[in-house]
Image: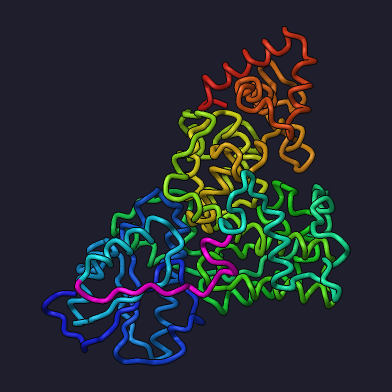
Amino acid sequence: MTAATVAAPADTLRLVLGDQLNPGHSWFATHDDGVVYVLMEVGQETDYVLHHAQKILAIFAAMRDLARQLREAGHRVRYVAIDDASNRQSIPANLEALVAHYGASRLQYQQPDEWRLDAQLRDWGAMQPFAVDCVGSEHFYTTRTEVAEQFKGRKQWLMESFYRRMRARHAVLMDEAGEPEGGQWNFDHDNRKPWPGYPALPPDARPVHDHSVLWATIEAAGVKSFGNPHAAQLRWPLNRAEALAWLDHFIATTLPDFGAYEDAMSTRSERLFHSLLSFALNTKMLGPQEVVQRAEAAYQAGHAPLAAVEGFIRQILGWREYVRGIYWAQMPGYGERNALGHTTPLPQWFWTGQTRMRCMSHAVGQSLDGAYAHHIQRLMVIGNFALLAGLDPAAVHRWYLGVYIDAFEWVELPNTLGMSQFADGGLLATKPYVSSAAYIDRMSDYCKGCAYDRKQRTGDKACPFNALYWDFFLRHQDTLGKNVRIALVYRQLQKMPEAETAAIQAQAQALLGRLDDL
């Protein structure tokens, strides 16, 4: 990228983004010395939100691994490292320099999955004197617009109807008569058990990587981050071979118990029976089709029960594709929605995990330590508190996007802003997903040994979730009072003595005034 560097000319540059790490993409099926594959580590991508250290480290390490694989397969690769002197720290600026450097007449890129990158590359490409082409990533079951097309003209979009359509179209868990296996589409009611300590947890057979040198390079380049990098013990699959091995392990040892305990939480395990495949999926080292096929094959072979397999497949074939459709239908501007008018800043312990609430301390602390929490921890502990406390949904979104290793905006934003924070006013979720301490106690061991009493609503020892829960519905009665899915809550409030609701509101206001000290 400098005048002193001489490179063989190339007709075409092909950009590979950090979440497009699929070595099986059709691009790589043939060799052409006139094509150079470009991967780059840039400040533009590390800095648009504050990211967890492991997220930056894992993506960079996985990108470098793909570059190695491509070179070994005989492809030409230009890798722009974060500390390269010629690195402009911007994707368009680097591309302009590289096109000039190679004398290329064409740039190709795979369809980005985040709106900001899609708009940036589209707008930049339209202004270039050379040809700029966008191709598909060859990853998802659906197109960007398919969900919006299915629900065009409807006031309410329902994931369940989308999911059933996908099951039928792709013949997943369908019998010979074209009916769903087991006679029903959804076995969610069978998948809500707390984990009592048995069955035994499967072994963690993920690879262990030492990327201390890369982490030192990242830090020396001035990249800002938070959380524990665990650079010497990074435990995430960083290439397709490792991801496939981990998929095999999950199917063989974990999938049979996934369903029953998918909503359970425990201080004894951060993973329980979850797959930990989302990072490999969202960086495209694995394809959703092959993961679904492997899970279905396990059911057909009698290795895993239908409820577990259906619950797992629903997350991928149903929910994952659905939220992507929501994202592209609602962008740009979806991230600014704030239907409930919440503006409270995040408490400082979102960055430390140091709170006396045992559930929040564990879920936030685990997130900071490992860049991971499973969906119920994200929704019904951290997200639950954020919604009850009226935290700014845009700030909550930025935290989720930064802290989780599998978080890319297309999947994270609808889950956080829509499903978790109800900030889209009910487009994604038909009701706010909030609870008092009772739900957390029923599904976890968090409440045992906590400094707060899960049964008390008021007083110094009362669990903050309890007063905040009832106060949330009192505060938002004008907005939520006519929602039929939470009618029971308002009937209960109507039966409460006025003195009790007043005490609850006073307790809640006191809590909201000292969030940093909870």
Residue 119: in magenta span: no
Residue 132: in magenta span: yes
Answer with the quarter of the image where residue 134 lies: bottom left
Give the quarter of the figure containing the C terminus.
Answer: top right
Q: Nearer the viewer, residue 16 or 214?
A: 16
Percent x, y for residue 475?
Answer: 60, 21
Q: Residue at x 60, y 40 (%)?
A: 383
Percent x, y for residue 376?
Answer: 67, 47
Q: Is residue 370 visible?
A: no
Percent x, y for residue 470?
Answer: 68, 23
Furthest residue in direction right, as rendered:
183
| 374 sits left or right of 338 in the view | right
Q: Nearer the viewer, residue 518 or 193?
A: 193
| 437 sits left or right of 229 in the view | right
* Overall secondary structure of the magenta section: loop
Magenta segment boundaries in residue numbering: 129-146
What is the image's colouring?
rainbow
